Amino acid sequence: MKDKEKIELLAPAGDLEKLKIAIDYGADAVYFGGEMFGLRAAAKNFGIEEIREGIEYAHAKGKRAYITINIFAHNEDIHELELYLNRIKEIPIDAFIVSDPGIIMMIRELIPDAEIHLSTQANMTNYKTAQFWHKQGVKRIVLAREMTFPEIRELRRRLPVSLEFEGFVQGAMCISYSGRCLLSNFMIERDANRGECAHPCRWKYHLVEEQRPGEYFPIEEDERGTYILNSRDLCMIEHIPDLVGAGLSSAKIEGRMKSIFYVATIVGAYRKAIDAYYANPEVYVFNPEWLNELKKVSHREFTTGFYYNKPTNKDQNYQTSTYTREYTFVGLVKSYDNKTGIAVVEQRNKMNLGDEIEVFGPYTDYFTQKIEILLDAEDNPIESAPHPQQIVKIKMLQPVMEKYMFRKRK
């Protein structure tokens, strides 16, 4: 099957390094935010020249890159947004992810040939609304997370093939309706709909009775309290055939705030699963090792969200809002000498002589080895690499390449 017929694997790019890692590890497309007007204001995001460089890097690899301008704009945003669009309109951005009708109109006026993707923030949940947006020139709709497979299949059946559908397949889930949340704004005046969510749905809560101020009654399963709004993470890697069969054009990974280790691991696992499915759909069998890979990055317990049925209490985590972190990202390969078998590595967390590490890279399976030779940048033997982004040299038992990563079990 030709690549253009495959479901697109769409990865988050919180900064330029993550964009390049996502593409190198197998993403078909990436999405990123500019310096303003996206819903991940705390991410590093992209300056104008970084947008240019990122787009050039993606296009050189035959990949696509989308920019998010998906805030719900207030009056004071409009003038700055117009200036911003004029600054980027000559950059060959593949698509604009937008939620606000007024912003769609502005992009149409300033960049007439722009491809528009409707953000999940627009809460598109039925075929009539999809028809409306398609008539406004929207090429793709990022579906609300609340849609089920039967609903998505009906959308596909009723709407022209020229309208694409994109669905989230991996990452954090909002407790509110497709992210349209006022809780953060109400509690600490940080607007989730303008990129500043403080994630109060992950906090601990107690019950206070009106006539007993100051008396806090725990709502708990154990002594740590409860997290009544704390959703599990979405994970659909075991269900690639159903995603394809529902008519999705793009499988989207959440996580512009995540690390390059997260991006590489998640993208790499989904790439293997998708490619294995398309290689021979009739005999495709899911490999549990792909799911095990996903569990090696920081995550909450997994759920399939709304795809198969309405989530129940089993899709919430009432015990803790902390992540499961069984592995630590310890190194990024900068270069490798085939003659000596020595890799130059940028330390990302402390590693020691004698550590057993897992080594993985794009389109490869991981291998395990011990660090038996550890040198500093001047080739002096050292016992450990404790300094952030310290450059070290490590003797490898198998060949590696630039951008391979090292992890170790905690």
Image (spheres, rainbow, N blue to C red):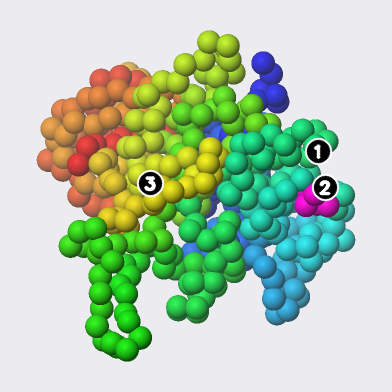
Q: How many marks?
A: 3
Q: Amino acid at mark 3?
A: Lys
Marks 3/1: CA distance?
Answer: 34 Å
**Displayed quadrant of residue 152:** top right
Residue 248 seen by the camera: no
Among the two numbered marks 3 and 2 on one chain, the one whose residue lies closer to the N terminus: 2
Residue 215: x and y in percent read: 24, 83
Residue 180: x and y in percent read: 59, 64
Residue at numbered disc 1: 159
Point 72% across, 69% down: residue: 81
Residue at numbered disc 3: 314
**Displayed quadrant of residue 326:** top left
- Name the foreground residue: 160 vs 312: 312
Secondary structure found at label 2:
helix
Residue 372 is labelled as none
Residue 106's place in the image compared with 12, above or below, is: below
Point 33% across, 70% down: residue: 205
Marks 3/2: CA distance?
Answer: 35 Å
Marks 1/2: CA distance?
Answer: 7 Å
Magenta stretch bounds: 128-133
Residue 31: x and y in percent read: 61, 47
Cβ atoms under marks 1 and 2 closer than 8 Å? yes
Left/right of residue 72 with respect to residue 159 in the rendered view? left
Q: Amino acid at mark 1?
A: Leu
- Name the foreground residue: 138 vs 204: 204
Residue 131 is labelled as 2
> Which quarter of the image is occupied by the C terminus?
top left
Point 87% across, 61% down: residue: 109
- Name the foreground residue: 143 vs 18: 143
